[in-house]
Amino acid sequence: MHIITRKRIIQAATLHKDCATALSGWYQTMKSASFANFSELKASFNTVDKVEHLFVFDIGGNKLRLIAAIHFNTGKVFIREILTHSEYGKGKWKE
């Protein structure tokens, strides 16, 4: 999959050093894979949820939420937000 943009991963890893390894693992897995649909994605990331048109990944043992738009037909992953659990709970990312 082609991930847009890795910069958000790097920024989040810098801010949340305890999740840097988990973020890197997510990036490497997504980059090296090719998912055709949500079922295939769920087989690799069992904690991923679909919320409307976005996909929400639990990162670092539920410490962070990575929110992405995924276009399976083009193989592109657009990282929208990487939030802490409490930021995610406020729901502003849905606006």
Image: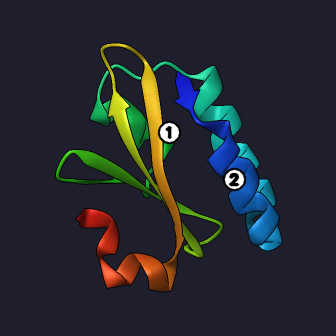
| Image height of 36 relative to 51, above or below | above
Measured as percent of width and height from the top left, residue 89 is found at 36, 82
Which is more toward the observer, 57 or 14? 14
Identity of the residue furthest to the top in this view = 74
Residue 87 is at least partly visible in this image: yes
Amino acid carrying mark 2 in the image: Leu
Amino acid carrying mark 1 in the image: Ser
Which is more toward the observer, 39 or 93? 93
| Image height of 11 relative to 2, above or below | below
Give the SS element for disc 2. Answer: helix
Q: Could you tell me which residue is drawn at 29 percent across and 26 percent down?
A: 37
Q: Is residue 29 left or right of residue 18?
A: left
Measured as percent of width and height from the top left, residue 64 is found at 57, 69
Give the SS element for disc 1. Answer: helix
Measured as percent of width and height from the top left, residue 95 is found at 23, 65
Q: Could you tell me which residue is drawn at 76 percent across and 59 percent down?
A: 13
Q: Verify CB contact (< 8 Å) between mark 1 and mark 2.
A: no
Circle 2 Cα neighbour tier, 10 Å, few/some/many (<14 / 14–19 / ≥20) = many
Residue at mark 1 to residue at mark 2: CA–CA distance: 15 Å
Which is more toward the observer, 43 or 49? 49
Q: Specify how the rendered protein is coloured.
A: rainbow
Residue 22 is at least partly visible in this image: no
Q: Residue 23, which numbered label?
A: 2
Which residue carries the number 1 mark?
Answer: 44
Q: Is residue 52 left or right of residue 32?
A: left
Q: Residue 77, which numbered label?
A: none
| Image height of 47 relative to 27, above or below | below
Mark earlier in primary sequence (1, 2): 2
Q: Which image quadrant is residue 38 in?
A: top left
Q: How many marks?
A: 2
Circle 1 Cα neighbour tier, 10 Å, few/some/many (<14 / 14–19 / ≥20) = few
